[in-house]
Amino acid sequence: MNTVDISLISQQALWATFVVTLLLGAIMQRTSFCTMGAIADLFVMSNLSRLRQWSLAIGVAILGVMLLSSFGLIDVSKSIYTSSKLMYLSILIGSTLFGLGMVLASGCGSKTLVRIGGGNLKSLVVFLVLALVAYMTLRGLLAVIRINMLDAFFITLNSNQDLPSILSAQLGQSRSSSHLMLGSIIGGAFVLFALLDKSFWTAKNLLAGFGVGLAICAVWWISGYLAFVAEDPNTLEEVFLATNSGKMESLSFVAPYAYSLDWLMFYSDTSKVLTIGIVAVLGMVCGSAGVALVTKTFRWETFLNPEDTANHLVGGALMGFGGITALGCTIGQGLSGISTLALGSFLAIPGFFLGAYLGLRYLQVRLASNPCS
């Protein structure tokens, strides 16, 4: 009987994640991929280029997950996004707060890591604040507020909350057939929206959309196939190795901030081990830093004034609380979650837009009232 080498499989998953996120950080740095920037471009300049980048990434991720699922390589029902419990209030409020926070902090969780790699000290402060508040929202004081005031409002569905499961339960057809149909239609629609505009067809835009979307799929494969063990030798149960949730995961950049801070603070505790989320944080920074150094765009940047400092501190805190409450950020819910066609992820998207719009309006009012600042 073959013995499963848990340690070796975990190491392979971690190294694979590092390589993927190293490339992803480089792509984001090179192409300026940014979901906050996409929303800002839409509302402020009516420019859709970066929104189309995000749309293409979503479409590619949905189609990629559909194919991985149809070939039996991953099972999206075993992710945190597709449970039968739909915490609608937490998702709506959390995503709105996150959207507001990412505008105040000059970028979402992934963009913060990219900016750190480029020498932005403001983003380093945002990282620390976001990580601390995220940890408080996971297990500390704010967790009590989240659980008692927001998570208490939910709907329990008769099936998993991903659209293929809901449709198959209603029509009585197989889930795989529903996934192929819905994945093709919804994923194709996102891709079509991005590619219909011929001016979008540039190497930069295509690299951003396809690169980010494929990275989401790659990490789903890493955690859901490479790091999956059907029978753990220690427990005789199935296990997803090297994940903090114990379930299949893809990229998200809120909870991994908290776990990264926890790992650094309690490194000597042997129970604290590297996970896919922690390694992804490191990979993003290294990839971005590599491109910034090679292209000679690396430069130190710090706060302009006390108000700029306050905005970034509040923004980081809002993202930490909002991202945990919403079960993900604009990458976690806006790409990884939506790639599973989870209903909660579709609820989170409007929240990100609303929060970002409120943040942009706030900054416009402040700038108008202080034209010389």
Image (spheres, rainbow, N blue to C red):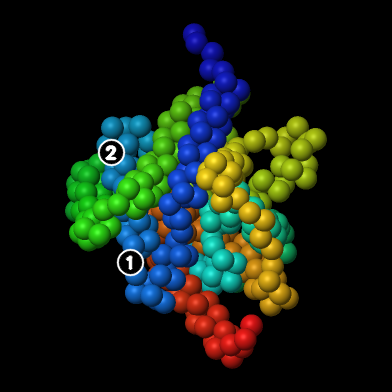
Residue nearer the viewer, 236 or 45: 45
Residue 117: horizontal and vertical position, in percent? 60, 48
Where residue 232 sits: x, y (%)? 54, 25
Q: Residue at x 71, y 74 (%)?
A: 305
As drawn, 216 above or below 270: below
Most extreme residue toward the bottom is 369
Q: At x 43% / y 31%, what residue is drawn?
A: 225
| 51 left or right of 130 in image | left
Task: Report, in whole angstroms, how far the alpha carbon at label 1 lies from the one at label 2.
Answer: 28 Å
Q: Residue at x 23, y 55 (%)?
A: 195
**What type is the residue that disc 2 sits on?**
Leu
Q: Which residue lies most toward the front here?
A: 296
Which label is found at residue 197?
Answer: none
Q: Are marks 1 and 2 in contact (CB under 8 Å)?
A: no
Please tell me whether mark 1 sits on a helix, a strand or a loop.
loop
Number of residue marks: 2
Q: Nearer the viewer, mark 1 or mark 2?
A: 1
Residue 97 horizontal/vertical position (percent): 55, 71
How would you rate the neighbour count of disc 1 (Cα within 10 Å): few for under 14, some for 14-19, many for 20 or more? some
Looking at the rendered image, the quarter that the C terminus falls into is: bottom right
Q: Residues within 10 Å of mark 2 (few under 14, many from 20)?
A: some
The kind of residue on which mark 1 rests is: Leu
- Residue shown at 55%/29% (left/top)? 15
Q: Does 315 appear above or below 187?
A: below
**What residue would you read off at disc 1?**
48
Q: Which residue is mark 2?
A: 67
- Residue 323 appears in which quarter of the rendering? bottom right
Q: Position of residue 43 (x, y in %)?
A: 40, 76
Residue 278, relative to residue 371: is it above or below? above
Q: Is residue 216 visible in this depiction of the protein? A: no
Q: Secondary structure at mark 2?
A: helix
Q: Which badge, 1 or 2, is on the more N-terminal residue?
A: 1
